[in-house]
Image (cartoon, rainbow, N blue to C red):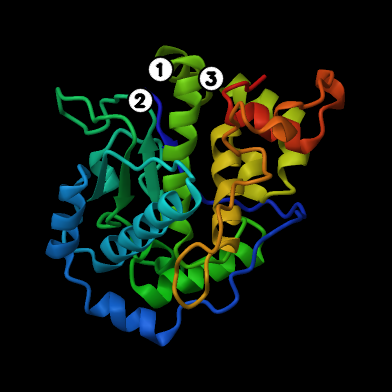
């Protein structure tokens, strides 16, 4: 089983570069919109789009996912971005899921997975789960494991300030998991579903694979953030894409001002784009960071 996840605890202090500061942060009008969010109405809207949801009344998660999906759909219309969406979005106590760390914030299964404990049904691919944090013990860091809007904003600022994440955007948690969905679909199209499942499972179950990744790519991926440095290629891409997305958001309308993946390693190339097709061929030892990221994006992880 493979689960690609987002937030984990870490105490490394290695520096990094190219972070994306969101700036305006959680403005009062956004807080008001979250308080007034109608979770049932949001779920009905997603159902019409073929996205199954179970928000369990969580206003922040429902509102945040609505904002992200609206922005991606708008980008698809205006910029022909081609972004794909999750098959489902759920809020769940991670103690009830087959995950390594019940304190994680989010999880996205890239392939059909027995994600729920004691269930004989596989969770469909590209389903996002956000932790309800029901089982998280009280403590001085309790705000990190909270869906209170102010606490989410505070923890995002802290994760960015400590160089753990690539942006302090208060919707970072949503963007990170949606980035997994977009990346996973691209890898599946490039190498096939079985190969994707094998690669994902390898990074989940083989410690030596993670060690090789950290030894070979960790320092380069630290330019994104510490989480990208210390996890795996799936997380590196998600962290990098999250920063790109956050930097393209209008701070007040919460809509994308452009396709944030154009002229990045994650651009979808087409035969009518010769300027991007002629990519130089590098030896493995001399690949620049952009080409390493491009390989990760396309399912080439070694």
Mark 2 vs mark 3: in front: 2
Camera-side residue of 270 and 47: 270
**Picture coordinates of residue 250 (x, y %)?**
52, 71
Q: Is disc 2 in contact with disc 1, using a CB cutoff of under 8 Å?
A: yes
Q: Callout 2 environment at 10 Å: few (<14), some (14 to 19), or many (20+)?
A: many
Q: Quadrant of residue 257?
A: bottom right
Is 293 drawn above or below residue 148 in the view shown?
Answer: above
- Report the disc number at residue 289: none
Q: Which residue is mark 2?
A: 111
**Picture coordinates of residue 211 (x, y %)?**
66, 26
Residue at point 59%, 47% (across, down) = 261
In the picture, the quarter occupied by the N terminus is top left
Judge whether residue 45 can be spotted in this image. Answer: yes
Drawn side of residue 297 relative to residue 80, left or right: right
Residue at point 45%, 69% (across, down) = 254
Camera-side residue of 202 and 139: 202
Judge whether residue 165 can be spotted in this image. Answer: no
Residue at point 32%, 41% (across, down) = 86
Q: Which residue is mark 3?
A: 206
Q: Disc 2 to disc 1, how far (Cα)? A: 7 Å
Q: Callout 3 environment at 10 Å: few (<14), some (14 to 19), or many (20+)?
A: few
- Report the disc number at residue 193: 1
Q: Disc 2 to disc 3, how far (Cα)? A: 18 Å
Q: Quadrant of residue 286?
A: top right
Dot 2: element: loop
């Amino acid at each position: 089983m493979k689960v690609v996840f987002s937030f984990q605890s870490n105490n490394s202090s290695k520096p990094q570069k190219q972070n994306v500061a969101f700036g305006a942060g959680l403005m009062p009008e956004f807080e008001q919109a979250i308080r007034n969010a109608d979770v049932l109405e949001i779920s009905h809207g997603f159902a019409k789009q073929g996205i199954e949801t179970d928000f369990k009344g969580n206003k922040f998660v429902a509102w945040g996912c609505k904002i992200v999906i609206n922005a991606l759909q708008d980008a698809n219309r205006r910029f022909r971005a081609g972004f794909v969406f999750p098959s489902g979005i759920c809020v769940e106590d991670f103690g009830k899921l087959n995950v390594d760390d019940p304190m994680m914030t989010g999880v996205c299964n890239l392939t059909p997975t027995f994600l729920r404990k004691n269930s004989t049904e596989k969770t469909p691919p590209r389903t996002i789960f956000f932790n309800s944090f029901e089982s998280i013990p009280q403590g001085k860091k309790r705000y990190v494991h909270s869906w209170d809007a102010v606490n989410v904003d505070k923890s995002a600022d802290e994760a960015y300030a400590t160089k753990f994440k690539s942006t302090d955007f208060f919707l970072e948690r949503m963007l990170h998991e949606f980035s997994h969905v977009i990346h996973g679909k691209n890898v599946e199209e490039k190498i096939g579903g079985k190969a994707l499942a094998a690669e994902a499972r390898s990074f989940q179950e083989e410690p030596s694979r993670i060690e090789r990744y950290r030894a070979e790519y960790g320092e380069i991926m630290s330019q994104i953030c510490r989480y990208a440095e210390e996890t795996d290629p799936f997380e590196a891409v998600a962290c990098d894409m999250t920063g790109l997305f956050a930097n393209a958001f209008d701070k007040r309308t919460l809509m994308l001002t452009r396709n944030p993946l154009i002229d990045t390693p994650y651009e979808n190339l087409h035969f009518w784009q010769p300027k991007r097709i002629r990519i130089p061929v590098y030896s493995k030892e001399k690949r620049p960071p952009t080409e390493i990221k491009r390989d990760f994006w396309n399912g080439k992880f070694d």
